[in-house]
Image (spheres, helix red, strand yellow):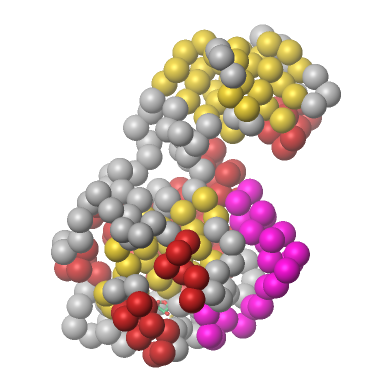
Amino acid sequence: MHRFKVTELGDHVFWLRDAEREHLVRVLRLSSGDAILGFDNSGREWLAEILKIEDNSVTCVMLEERQPHVEACSEVYLVAGLSKGEKLEWVIQKGTELGMYGFVPLRAKRSIMRLEGSKASERVERWQKIAREAAKQSHRVREPQIFGITDWEDIASVLPETTQWLIPYEEEKSQGLSQTLATLVSDKPIAILIGPEGGFDPSEVSYATEHLKAQSVSLGPRILRAETAALAALTITLAHWADLG
Ligand code: SAH
């Protein structure tokens, strides 16, 4: 059954507009009476029937509410240095499938890609769309939030104050991610900082350890590409603290 992100929630009905309406009408060619699933990012999902299709919206009647256990019980964020090309798109798509809670693109010192102004906001919208599609595809009931492109100085204010920060760093030789995870607590968010292609500048690692109280961790003796490191760290964290695996 096709799943849609609810645009507006009413009493026993909901509406789909814009891209969701377009997808239902033009791509899937569904019509009144067809059954669909709707979700609204709150963890709930409804089995519903299409009541009417209009130029600006599709009205659906809720038949049954469900609370599927598909969302990871730990809030794990990825914070990744801006990288060239489509690498971050890939990380966002795969991270969403694995159960990532949110994603913060970071302007790192060695980020080659520089996105400013309208280019930056367009890119963030595109990333949000990728997360939405991936969330639907993997039957999640919440789409990960993609934050605006953030500078180091603002990073602490973007995520919850209680966030536990980890910074995988290839020069870290003493502490591994797995052993460090065991020292964290399950009811507070975890944020994993991953460098851009060229890695973090040592001054960025110091900033994270001083200002965010981040723990620097190793992902093992082999150097991973940034996108591999992001997904490996996310996988290990969700397997430890949530339901992956
Ligand atoms: N500076 C290096 C590698 C950068 S890898 C170089 O260019 O040769 C990109 C990012 O992936 C790093 O910033 C780090 O966050 C992460 N990473 C890759 N391999 C890692 C490892 N073995 N341990 C910890 N972090 C790693």
Please give the name of the residue rendered at 39% of the width and 56% of the height, measured from the top-left corner: 160
Residue 115 painted magenta:
yes
Q: Position of residue 144 (x, y in %)?
A: 49, 48
Residue 236 in the image: above or below residue 52: below
Q: Is residue 125 left or right of residue 96?
A: right
Give the position of the N terminus as an image quadrant.
top right
Residue 178 in the image: above or below residue 35: below
Along the viewing direction, whichever of 146 and 98 lies nearer the viewer: 146
Q: Position of residue 211 (x, y in %)?
A: 35, 77
Q: Can I make out residue 228 in this image? A: no
Regarding ligand 1, which quadrant of the image does it lie in? bottom left
Please give the name of the residue rendered at 64% of the width and 78% of the height, measured from the top-left corner: 113
- Residue reaching furthest to the bottom: 202
- Marks counted in the figure total 0
Along the viewing direction, whichever of 123 and 8 lies nearer the viewer: 8
Q: Can I make out residue 149 in this image? A: yes
Residue 234 in the image: above or below residue 44: below
Please give the name of the residue rendered at 22% of the width and 51% of the height, measured from the top-left corner: 186
Magenta segment: 108-129
- Residue reaching furthest to the right: 55
